[in-house]
Image (spheres, rainbow, N blue to C red):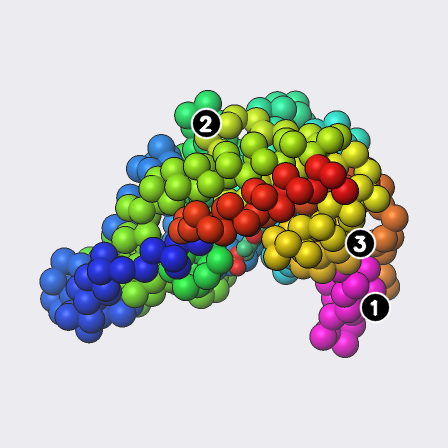
Amino acid sequence: MPGFELFGEEEKKEIADVLDTGVLFRYEFPEQRKGIYKVKELEDKFAAYCGVTHAQAVTSGTAALKVALMALGVGPGDEVITQGFTFVATWEAILDVGAIPVFTEVNETLNMDPADLRKKINDRTKCIIPVHMLGSAAEISEIISIAEEFGIPVLEDTAQAAGGKVNGRSLGSFGRCGTFSFDPVKTMTTGEGGMIITNDEQLWRNMSEYHDHGHDHIPNPGTRGGEGRNFIGFNYRMMELQGAIGIAQLAKLDFMIKQQKQHKAKLQQAALSIPGVTLRKIIDAEGDSATFFAFLLADKEQCQRVNRHLREKGAGAINFSENTWHFYPQWEHLLAGSTLTSSGWPFSTPEGKRRVVYSPELLPKSTAILERTLVFPISVKMDDDRLKNICEALQGAAAV
Ligand SMILES: *Cc1c(COP(=O)(O)O)cnc(C)c1O
């Protein structure tokens, strides 16, 4: 799972470069910074790593989603389709631009069900956000072809799958744009931070200007501040220290994934000894970022029995149907429409009329799948004792 396990001299050296100049801001200070532009360097390296032309760094993965939605022109009156198994950030960003999140089922990829996506598209749908949950790809080709049929842009929430690929192509590069998170538990981390990638130059310009208070990023002969403004913006700028850490972490990303894959393969083999078990559907095992290992039991009852055994052996797994941060029926604030605004926005109109009501029974298929799914986070430095402990617990679960 996390790059924080590998913090070392490489990160320290990159940070020291920034502290030596004293320039923490990604723009300005041309003389003082001695040619050091860490955020720009991270953007260029991340774009090259993903095989795209443009990357825009921002303050978080949530900011990345919001900046991308703004750049795509999504706002009030629009609907954005995403899946009901994701981190809350995905729909927070949709609501924050004033649009309404519409949730699809997940299938045995634990990602967006393309058949359900098709059913949920209507005239108001302005963006589709599949999420590559738990490190593994959504059925991205099917999703893109449905989106193309209706002329709707796809934004891939790749927060949990940096470095993942399908047929050699980076996740996040299939849609109009893709977003990443570098928060403390993501595969590569900058403490807080995010990135958006795209091959669309105009879309990138919109992101770049929006995230920087609307400064037009046209080369300006005067100093910064002399530019014009094409539209209202906001501040989601990444700072140089984060850019520096990101450069060191990106250089380790392939190594992290390689380690995780080896650990995942061992757990997978042990889990297959449990009768009735099936593995999560993986689109491309070669391109899997292997940050998590998920497997499905025959039913909820067996799933609970197996997890009880695993817990007794000190190797309990996560059941995401019970997880309050990642699964639709557990989001009590979404279901209740809780907000700090006095009008009730974004769940209600400025006049106080309810815009949308979410029912906890909306996604029976996702619930049925997640209730019988168990998940282990995979880390880079899983030592042999820990791996052996989990594998033995899994093998022992065959008898329960
Ligand atoms: C972590 C995460 C985000 C948000 O990223 P932050 O950097 O924590 O804001 C968005 N989507 C998904 C699926 C995530 O897991």
Marks 3 and 1, the one that precedes in the sequence: 3
Q: In this view, does 125 lie above or below 166?
A: below
| Residue type, mark 1 in image | Gly
Q: Which residue is drawn at 74% across and 39% down?
A: 399
Query: Relative to residue 339, is residue 13 drawn left or right?
Result: left
Reading the image, the residue beneath label 3 is 329
Q: Which residue is drawn at 46% across and 61% down?
A: 184
Where residue 274 appears, x then y in whole percent?
Answer: 69, 34
336 falls in the magenta region = yes
Q: Which of marks 3 and 2 is in front?
A: 2
**For the stretch drawn in magenta, what is the main secondary structure?**
loop
Marks 1 and 2, the one that precedes in the sequence: 2
Regarding mark 1 in the picture, which secondary structure is present there?
loop
Regarding mark 2 in the picture, which secondary structure is present there?
helix
Query: Relative to residue 220, is residue 175 drawn left or right?
Result: right
Q: Is residue 287 above or below residue 34?
A: above
Query: Relative to residue 97, is residue 373 drawn left or right?
Result: right
- Please give the count of numbered marks on the rendered protein: 3
Q: Which of marks 1 and 2 is in front?
A: 2
Residue 52 picture quarter: top left
Q: Which of 239 and 84 is in front in this view?
A: 84
217 falls in the magenta region = no
Reading the image, the residue beneath label 2 is 286
Q: Residue at x 33, y 42 (%)?
A: 255
- What range of the chain is rendered magenta? 331-350
Label 1 vs label 2: CA separation?
A: 50 Å
Q: Do the residues labelled 3 and 2 touch (CB within 8 Å)?
A: no
Q: Which of marks 3 and 1 is in front?
A: 3
Q: Is residue 362 visible?
A: yes
Where residue 198 appears, x then y in whole percent?
Answer: 43, 39
Reading the image, the residue beneath label 1 is 352
Binning the other alpha carbons within 10 Å of mark 2 as few (below 14), some (14 to 19) or many (20 upward) gives some
